[in-house]
Amino acid sequence: MSRQRDSRALADASALQRIRTLAYLLDDAIPIPGTPYRIGLDPIMGLIPGGGDVVGLFLSAYLVLECLRFRLPTETLFRMVGNLALDSILGLLPGMGDFFDAVWKSNARNLALLEAHLANPAQSEAADRQTVALIAIAVVAIVGGILLLMASLLRALLAALTAVG
């Protein structure tokens, strides 16, 4: 039993390090000279038309899915999915979406939620399996919905370009 517990603790520590590294890279890796403010790769990737936002979405979704292993309370999981959804949807807006990504920092917010739980895990009850499954489905649905939206917009753009040409 102790070996299994040690193995789980090691896996959780490894997952936590991956989450911290990814959140840092996506939201805080690059200092803005002359200011105390930092941005990450997420708003920069968003400048790449279409593909950049999708890559950022996949990485942010992975971060939320990785957090599921920490037996978070239902409220925390819903807040994480809300951060992901808000960032993904508003991040699609040309120009303003990239600014929003730089300011909102959903990955750093989700990391803070996870670390707050890990600092006081006894103060909350872990979500049940059905809720965790619902959260996983919601994350996949958000990713799928954004991909469908992007495909529809691309199709409409191509149709408009072929009608003009």
Image: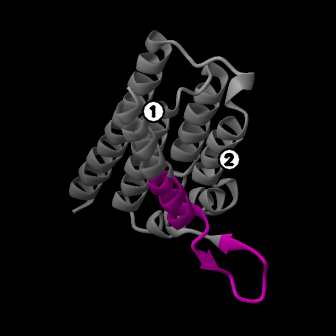
Of residues 7 and 74, the one drawn nearer to the viewer in this rendering: 7
For residue 20: magenta? yes
Across and down, in percent, residue 53 comes to 43, 55
Secondary element type, mark 1: helix
Tell which residue pokes out farthest to the right in this image: 35
Image position of 26 with respect to 82: above or below: below
Q: Residue lying furthest bottom in this view?
A: 34
Residue at left offset 63%, top offset 53%: 108
The part of the image, by quadrant, that contains residue 76 is top right
Residue pictured at 58% horizontal, 56% vertical: 97
Q: What is the magenta range?
A: 17-38
Residue 132 image position (x, y, % from top left): 46, 20
Where is 115 relative to 49, above or below?
A: above
**How many residues crowd around disc 1 within 10 Å: few (fewer than 14), some, or many (20 or more)?**
some
- What mark, if any, has residue 26 been given in the picture? none
Q: Secondary structure at mark 2?
A: helix
Q: Which mark is residue 112?
A: 2
* Viewer-proximal residue among 64 and 3: 3
> Residue 127's spot in the image, x, y percent?
56, 17
Q: Earlier in the sequence, mark 1 or mark 2?
A: 1
Q: Residue furthest front?
A: 2
At horizontal 50% and vertical 62% (from top left) the residue drawn is 21
Is residue 116 among the parts visible in the rendering? yes
Picture residue at 67% right of the left edge, 73% below the top: 38
